[in-house]
Amino acid sequence: MLLLISVFAIAWVAVSIIGTQAYFRGEQTKTIHERNWNSKSFDQLAQSFTGKETNYLERVPAYAFDPTVTARNK
């Protein structure tokens, strides 16, 4: 019984690590909204989980940049 519990726990940890890496690798390549373009906290998390820096040459804005509209004006 103890062996079964330990195998389950190890598998759960492995799946959670792989899932976290897959999520952040996917997010690093998706289109990005203007308000999140310079999110330093996301960049730090993504780099610590995946070991890769976000390549902003691959990421494109989800919407056209409009300098007259900011998050505070909405």
Image (cartoon, rainbow, N blue to C red):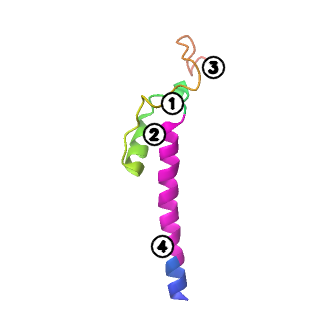
Magenta-span inclusion, residue 14 = yes
Farthest top residue in view? 68
Q: Residues within 10 Å of mark 4 (few under 14, many from 20)?
A: few
Disc 2 target residue = 42
Q: Earlier in the sequence, mark 1 or mark 4?
A: 4
> Which three-letter amino acid code belongs to the residue tagged 1?
Asn
- Name the mark nearer the viewer: 3 or 4: 4
Q: Which residue is mark 4?
A: 10
Q: Main secondary structure of the magenta part?
A: helix
Tell whether label 4 touches label 3 (CB within 8 Å).
no
The residue identified by callout 3 is 74
For badge 2, the amino acid type reads Phe
Local SS, label 1: helix
Distance between the Cα atoms at labels 1 and 4? 35 Å
Q: Could you say which is closer to the camera, residue 71 or residue 61?
A: 61
Q: Are marks 1 and 2 in contact (CB under 8 Å)?
A: yes
Contact between labelled residues 2 and 4, with CB atoms less than 8 Å apart: no
Q: Which mark is residue 36?
A: 1
Please report whichever mark, 4 or 2, sits nearer to the chain's N-terminal start: 4
- Residue 48 x/y as whole percent: 38, 49
Circles 3 and 2: CB atoms closer than 8 Å: no
Residue 11 vs 66, above or below: the answer is below
Mark 1–mark 2 distance (CA, rounded to whole Å): 9 Å
Q: Is residue 44 above or below residue 22?
A: above
